[in-house]
Image (spheres, helix red, strand yellow):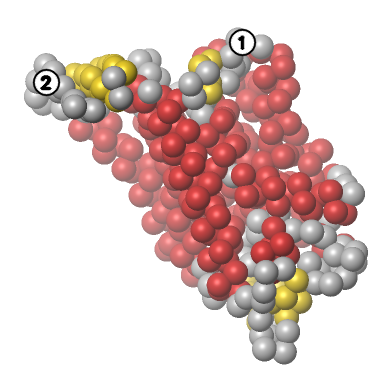
Amino acid sequence: MFMSLLLAHSSAVYNIEEVLAFHIVLIGKQWQVGRHLSLNVSEAGLLFVTFAIPLVLILITMPRYLRYLSKRGMVVDDVHKSPPTKVPSPVGPILFLGALVGEVLTWAFFGTMVPVALIGMAIVAFGVGIVDDLFVLGGMTKPLLLLLAGIPLLVCVVIQPSLYDPHLTFPVLGTTGEHFTIYTFLAIVAFPVVANAFNMMDSFNGELSWFALLTSVALLFGVALHWFFTPGFSVARVAATLPLVAVAGGFLFYNRFPSKAFDGDSGSLLLGALFAGLAIMDGVEVAAIIAILPAILNSFYTLSSVRGFVERRRMSARPTYIGGDGKLYASQDRSAPNTLIRLILLGGARGENDLVKDVTVLAAVACLLSGIISLLTWAA
């Protein structure tokens, strides 16, 4: 018999407490996982609220905000349509509002410093993004300013030393030694790296919103496993991850093909900074890196081809162009940046919707691998 499952000593009380013990025998090797799970009805309800309120808030406020942007003439060309259509932008302020409300609720319900740090990170990333939306920052200015997103992390770890563990946990290999200075330095550098990686995935209808939703769900899965299998890991950290999932889901409703709203840099940098902060504080860095691998590769291709940080609105050539049939083709211009999209189009022309589906499949595969990494890390 390759696998046997023993469920031992379970008792039902009013606050739904169970003692779960799993004994798994796989190819003659016994893996034993034990964890005392305690989640009462009120905590489950609070988890639902931290997800539902941001989601509903975005869904009901977005239409009025889109009308406001249109009346103010704050629209941009959807350049991948022929002829180009006008789309309201940026809707980053609504995404910021949803994330802010979700994290404030998490802090009010659970009293941990995790959402406080996330709020600080969100303010910095959103602030840098909205300034870039309105005035256009230089290619090097944005990543340098995004380093400031690490300041809330440093401040909050002084107040709550257990805010994050200065080590990495790998599947099979286990946990590295603690190196607070080195880890903290890398954590701060991660904010501009991840935020810009998200930003560079924001080129087509639904591309970023699908990517953000899939990666945030993969992140939530890893955090939930970490909580389930690690005694002392607070359920508040699961709650702090839910607003990101809600914001990404609400944004997808309006950003999917054909897009009714563009987030602008204020939205993409916000989503990336929140993702980075949660991965660091929740100790799921390895799985998080695997989940966003398509964005990391896209950033690497782009930066290596243009030889540095260049504001995309100031690039001399675009990586794609629209043919007479309305499909997208890879640019033959040698000065055009190499992007993940351009590499996909080298295999043949695509319609925008089909192209985004290809990118979404890549993201889904990466997130599936991330989930496997999480299982091997925490459940094994």
**Looking at the rendering, in which quadrant would you find the N terminus?**
top left
At mark 1, the secondary structure is loop
Residue 143 in the figure: left or right of residue 62: right
- Depth check, front residue: 257 or 30: 30
Pointer 2: what residue? 10
Q: In which quadrant of the rendered view does residue 296 lie?
A: top right
Q: Where is residue 6 drawn, in percent x and y?
A: 16, 22
Residue 175 in the figure: left or right of residue 262: left
Mark carried by residue 29:
none
Q: Residues within 10 Å of mark 2 (few under 14, many from 20)?
A: few
Residue 371 in the figure: left or right of residue 264: left
Q: Where is residue 285 drawn, in percent x and y?
A: 56, 30
Residue at left offset 84%, top offset 48%: 304
Q: Is residue 26 visible?
A: yes
Q: Amino acid at mark 1?
A: Glu
Q: Is residue 221 above or below residue 150?
A: below
Mark carried by residue 178:
1
Residue at left offset 79%, top offset 53%: 302
Q: Is residue 165 above or below residue 304?
A: above
Q: Amino acid at mark 2?
A: Ser
At mark 2, the secondary structure is loop
Mark toward the start of the polypeptide (1 vs 2): 2
Residue at left offset 43%, top offset 28%: 376
Q: CA distance from mark 1 to mark 2?
A: 37 Å
Q: Are marks 1 and 2 in contact (CB under 8 Å)?
A: no
Q: Residues within 10 Å of mark 1 (few under 14, many from 20)?
A: few
- Depth check, front residue: 222 or 158: 222
**Looking at the rendering, in which quadrant would you find the C terminus?**
top left
Q: Residue furthest bottom?
A: 324
